[in-house]
Every structure is written in C-alpha cells, then in structure tokens.
Amino acid sequence: MFFAYDEVNGTNFWNPETTARHIEHVSATVQGSTLDVRLAWKDKDGGVVLDETKRVLFGGETDVFWMDHDITLTASTAAIFAYPSGVNFPPYWHARDYGLFAANPFGRKAFDSKAPERVTKLAVGESVRVRFRLAVYAGQVSKARLDRDYASR
C-alpha cells in the first residue's frame, strides 16, 4: 500500500524521478493487529516537508480481510497545498494500467474541470487526517454485504 500526494510545497511526491523526493521510515511498532508507523516526507535536499503518522488495523472474517488506514499529515517546516478532504467526500477513484487503483479525496478538480478549485493550507504544526479501508473478499460479494460492511466501519 502506498500513500502519496502529487505536489507538497513544490515537491512531487507522486513521481520521485522528477524531484528526487523520498519518504523515509522513522519508526514502526506492532501491537496485536495494529501497525503504527511514522514517516518523514523529504524534499530533494533532505528537508522534512511533512510528518506522516499512520495506524493500520488489520482484521477480517472467514471470507474477507481488511486493513483500516488512519493517516495524519503534519506540516513540518512549511504550508501544504492540496484539495480539502472533508468537503470532497466521496473521493474520486481512478485506476491505471500499471496497477494503480486509488481513492483521491484531494484531486476533484483534476477529474472534473467544472468542480470548484479548493486549496488546503497547513501552517507549521497543523494537520490533516485521511482515513480509508481496503477490504479483500474471497469470491463474489453482494452489494448488500458491501453496504453492511461499509456501514459498520
């Protein structure tokens, strides 16, 4: 699983070849079915642009496995420019032929040119929180089951 965003303070975190960015592992702990991770989003000069705190809760049943992702991004040394996630629910989904399948709560304008442009600015120490769940089912699953599982999250 990979979480990134295109442009953060002029650094493209989606395509590292263009800006030499990297997301560095700071720490990770596991307790039961929960993984807690800290990551530092760094620009080409090694400066931290964002601090990411991620909690992944693993679970499932006989015919489904899921990972709940709870991500908090905190501005470290400068403001982040993106589309606000809260007002853009539901996120836009997109897929690419190289295997990408993504929920994008930020890029509404990129998918719909008629959508209003929105910018989110974070001052140093401010955060934005993103949550999503990935569920992998064994075999076909009914819409009723999906609706029930979604409602129970």
Image (cartoon, grey):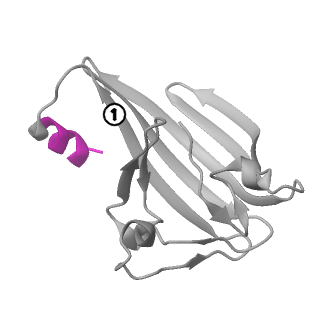
Which of 73 and 107 lies nearest the eye of the viewer?
107
Identify the magenta region: 145-153
The furthest residue to the front: 97
Residue 62 percent coordinates (x, y): 26, 17
Q: In the shown orientation, is residue 107 left or right of residue 90? A: right
Q: Is residue 152 magenta?
A: yes
Please name the predominant secondary structure of the magenta segment in the image. helix
Residue type at the position of mark 1: Ala
Q: Is residue 96 magenta?
A: no
Q: Is residue 48 above or below residue 79?
A: above
Q: Residue at x 77, y 56 (%)?
A: 19
Q: Is residue 121 above or below residue 28?
A: below
Asked where in the image residue 49 lies, by quadrant, the reply is bottom right
Residue ID for mark 1: 135
Q: Residue at x 86, y 58 (%)?
A: 47
Residue 95 percent coordinates (x, y): 39, 45
Q: Secondary structure at mark 1?
A: strand
Q: Is residue 80 above or below residue 14?
A: below
Binning the other alpha carbons within 10 Å of mark 1 as few (below 14), some (14 to 19) or many (20 upward) gives some
Q: Residue at x 34, y 65 (%)?
A: 89
Which of 109 and 151 lies nearest the eye of the viewer?
109
The furthest residue to the bottom: 116
Residue 69 percent coordinates (x, y): 48, 43
Quarter of the image with the C terminus is top left
Asked where in the image residue 74 lies, by quadrant, the reply is bottom right
